Image (cartoon, rainbow, N blue to C red):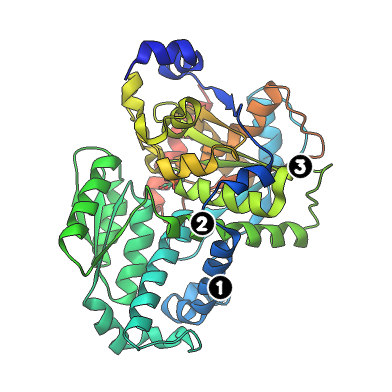
């Protein structure tokens, strides 16, 4: 890689190298209709995923009683956070127009993070395909029958493997083990100990690696290649994961309508999505563009030490560039975002649809974590705060935010044990008071 040439072509890389907080506005953003023409994922595929999740609702209610209230639909609240909005503008000394909302994927049932959307969906799709193939299920059946001991014995004959920084592993591990599959999660060094412990408690085999996420994924892929009865869930390239995440958009649209929040030419929607390898935020952004077109503006948010998607998009090198190529260490406490090389599939799919991308320091994520707890009594994990500085960046860049609705996607935190939550908060509080 010729870094000197990259620095000449893209001067922003110098600031990224210095781990400064930066924002990049996408110079090749197209209008939605034109951008969608070149994308192989379609709205029918997202609808198919949504229908499949509906078919599984009766099963999910039995398997996870916490989904009874939502009738087996795995969805999270959308809430106004006015006190946080004022505190944020105050502490970062920048005012912005518009209302600030939080999409609380930390409160998603079953595994408490955005990764539950795609991860659980893909496991369900594998289970459905196997059961239908074996003549044990038809699409017309009540899927509650999947909770039977007979079905569990059937699924035991198959295994699922995944590489993860933590939260994808949790969602795949919990869902697969519940259905009866044998499951192995290959975890990167960044994954928190409690995530590994929780999975082992549920009977999941956890293999740990001293290196980062890309290695964990590679090992998972290798394991699956050797075994025809093993399904590898590919966080870097999976279209199923992607469409599973994209289903979030139609659900969000309904929530906005129910809450009387208008999105149109005069009332733009801005959505800020913490980004690791890209699948979760990319899928959600894609789904939103399908429904809101040019009236929605989506931004990725990454740690200053792991801005892999930003680098991939900026240089258009996608999966052919890693943060280590420009000397960054990929070390961040935002474990879900500790990814050094982006998904080429997601980068290329979104390259004309994503409005921009920005970075945030670990220190600021912790500070905002404590601030959100103090102002709104909502506790997240550090990764989930990455979106919070989006409106600040845009205001500083002179973007017109009149009548805007800002949605910060709170991507995780629901599974964090009390002790770890307290430690996160204490750290944030110390940094705030410095
Ligand atoms: C809390 C949290 N937020 C955001 C993400 C980013 O998702 P993706 O890696 O699909 O970009 C992750 C990934 O694990 C996560 O755990």
Q: Identify the residue under disc 2.
A: 245
Q: Which mark is residue 311?
A: none
Q: Secondary structure at mark 1?
A: helix
Residue 187 spot, x, y in % from top left:
26, 49
Residue 320 seen in the figure: yes
Label 2 CB, ligand 1: below 8 Å? yes
Q: Earlier in the sequence, mark 3 or mark 1?
A: 1
Residue 299 spot, x, y in % from top left:
59, 37
Q: Quadrant of residue 224?
A: bottom left
Q: Is mark 3 in CB contact (under 8 Å) with mark 2?
A: no
Residue depth check, mark 3 versus mark 1: number of the one nearer the observer? 1
Q: State the residue lying farthest toward the right.
A: 266
Work out whether residue 351 or residue 281 is closer to the camera in this orientation and state it. Answer: 351
Q: Secondary structure at mark 2?
A: helix
Binning the other alpha carbons within 10 Å of mark 2 as few (below 14), some (14 to 19) or many (20 upward) gives: many
Binning the other alpha carbons within 10 Å of mark 1 as few (below 14), some (14 to 19) or many (20 upward) gives: few
Disc 3 to disc 1, how far (Cα)? 29 Å
Q: Identify the residue under disc 1.
A: 51
């Amino acid at each position: 890689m010729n870094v000197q040439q990259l620095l000449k072509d893209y001067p922003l890389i110098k600031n990224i190298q210095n781990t400064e907080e930066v924002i990049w506005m996408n110079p090749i953003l197209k209008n939605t209709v034109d951008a969608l023409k070149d994308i192989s994922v379609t709205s029918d595929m997202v609808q198919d995923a949504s229908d499949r999740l509906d078919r599984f609702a009766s099963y999910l209610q039995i398997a996870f009683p916490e989904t009874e209230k939502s009738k087996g639909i795995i969805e999270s609240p959308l809430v106004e956070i006015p006190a946080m909005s004022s505190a944020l503008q105050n502490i970062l000394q920048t005012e912005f127009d518009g209302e600030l909302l939080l999409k609380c994927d930390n409160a998603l049932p079953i595994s408490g993070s955005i990764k539950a959307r795609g991860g659980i969906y893909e496991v369900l799709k594998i289970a459905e395909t196997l059961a239908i193939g074996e003549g044990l299920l038809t699409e017309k059946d009540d899927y509650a029958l999947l909770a039977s001991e007979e079905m569990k014995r059937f699924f035991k004959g198959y295994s699922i493997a995944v590489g993860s920084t933590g939260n994808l592993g949790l969602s795949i591990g919990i869902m697969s083990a519940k259905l009866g599959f044998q499951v192995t999660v290959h975890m990167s060094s960044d994954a928190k100990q409690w995530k590994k412990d929780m999975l082992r408690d549920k009977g999941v085999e956890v293999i740990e690696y001293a290196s980062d996420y890309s290695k964990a994924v590679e090992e998972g892929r290798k394991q699956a290649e050797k075994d025809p009865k093993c399904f590898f869930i590919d966080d870097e390239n999976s279209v199923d994961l992607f469409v599973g995440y994209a289903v979030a958009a139609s659900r969000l649209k309904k929530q906005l309508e129910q809450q009387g929040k208008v999105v149109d030419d005069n009332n733009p929607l801005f959505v800020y999505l913490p980004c690791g390898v890209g699948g979760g935020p990319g899928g959600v952004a894609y789904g939103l563009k399908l429904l809101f077109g040019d009236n929605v503006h989506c931004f990725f948010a990454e740690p200053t030490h792991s801005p892999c998607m930003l680098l991939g998009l900026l240089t258009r090198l996608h999966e052919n560039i890693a943060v280590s190529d420009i000397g960054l260490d990929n070390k961040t406490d935002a474990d879900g975002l500790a990814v050094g090389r982006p998904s080429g599939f997601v980068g290329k799919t979104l390259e004309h649809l994503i409005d921009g991308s920005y970075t945030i320091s670990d220190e600021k994520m912790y500070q905002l974590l404590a601030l959100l707890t103090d102002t709104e009594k909502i506790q997240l994990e550090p990764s989930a705060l990455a979106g919070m500085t989006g409106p600040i960046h845009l205001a500083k860049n002179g973007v017109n935010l009149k009548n805007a609705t800002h949605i910060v996607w709170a991507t995780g935190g629901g599974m964090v044990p009390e002790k770890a939550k307290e430690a996160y908060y204490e750290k944030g509080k110390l940094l705030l008071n410095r």
